[in-house]
Image (tube, helix red, strand yellow):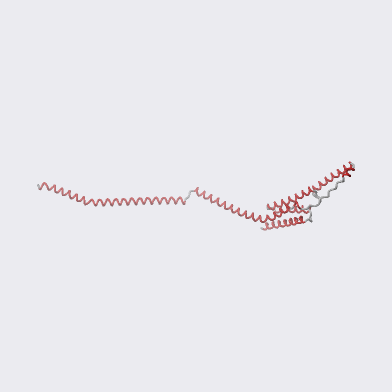
Amino acid sequence: MRILFEPVKSGWLNISENLIMSESKEPQLTESKKAKSEALSQGLWKALWIAIAVCILWLAIEGGFRLYHRPAALDARVSELEGKIATVQAQEAQLEASLKGSLEAEKTLAPVASRIHDMISQVNSLPMTALPVAQQSAPVSDQATESWTKRFFKQIQSLGDKLVRVQVVGDVKDVALTPAAQDLIRQQLRLHLVSARMAWLSNMPHVCKDDLAQAQALLAKHFQAQASSVVSMQKNLTDLQAEIVKAGNVKKGS
């Protein structure tokens, strides 16, 4: 009996020992699994952070390239706009310079032009040389008694006088002018003054001086030299010519 139960006993002992050994190994296996899982999780987190850092670094590098290496079309557009701005600034500077020059020129031109304008307005009031004395017509009673031959010869004589008067007005040589001739002379004087004013404002002093000289000659020839208004205009014309010559010399010197 004892011999029969010995193997059974030894088997149970082996099983119990295995169970005890397995129970003693279970905590070790649990701890190793836990350590492996922790190491795996730490590795995954490190890999994730590395991936995030790589993405951020790539975005920064790409943004830097885009910022410091703009497309050629954008650079060309920027250059074009800069050129236009420079052109506008240059035109603005030229405009300011021209406006400044115009204001300075106006300060010089305005007084002379104003004096010529005043003389133009005085032309109609200037006294001219005396009109010829109108011939008195014969009394009606005498005309009635005259024969037709005398009347015929008088008509021829009056026609000749008219022809001679037309010739005198055309040559403008007679001291005593008709009203129509006087109007013509006044218009000529006014025309010379207007032309002188326009020439002065157009920066043509030589033309202005010539027109003033012609106006002065016309004034001396057909207007009353003793009249105060004529004397005053003659003086103004002389002063203006001297001032124009002085202004021309200043421009040559500058």
Front in this rendered view, residue 46 or 238: 238
State which quarter of the image contains the C terminus.
bottom right
In this view, the residue farthest toward the left is 1
Residue 155, compared with residue 217, is above or below; it is above
Residue 229, compared with residue 147, is above or below; it is below
Q: Position of residue 33 (x, y in %)?
A: 27, 50
Q: Position of residue 54 (x, y in %)?
A: 39, 51
Query: Which of the 4 image quarters holds residue 144?
Result: top right
In this view, the residue farthest toward the top is 148
Q: Is residue 179 left or right of residue 200?
A: right
Q: Position of residue 94 (x, y in %)?
A: 60, 53
Front in this rendered view, residue 156 or 37: 156
Q: Is residue 73 left or right of residue 189?
A: left
Q: Is residue 245 left or right of residue 63?
A: right
What is the count of numbered marks?
0
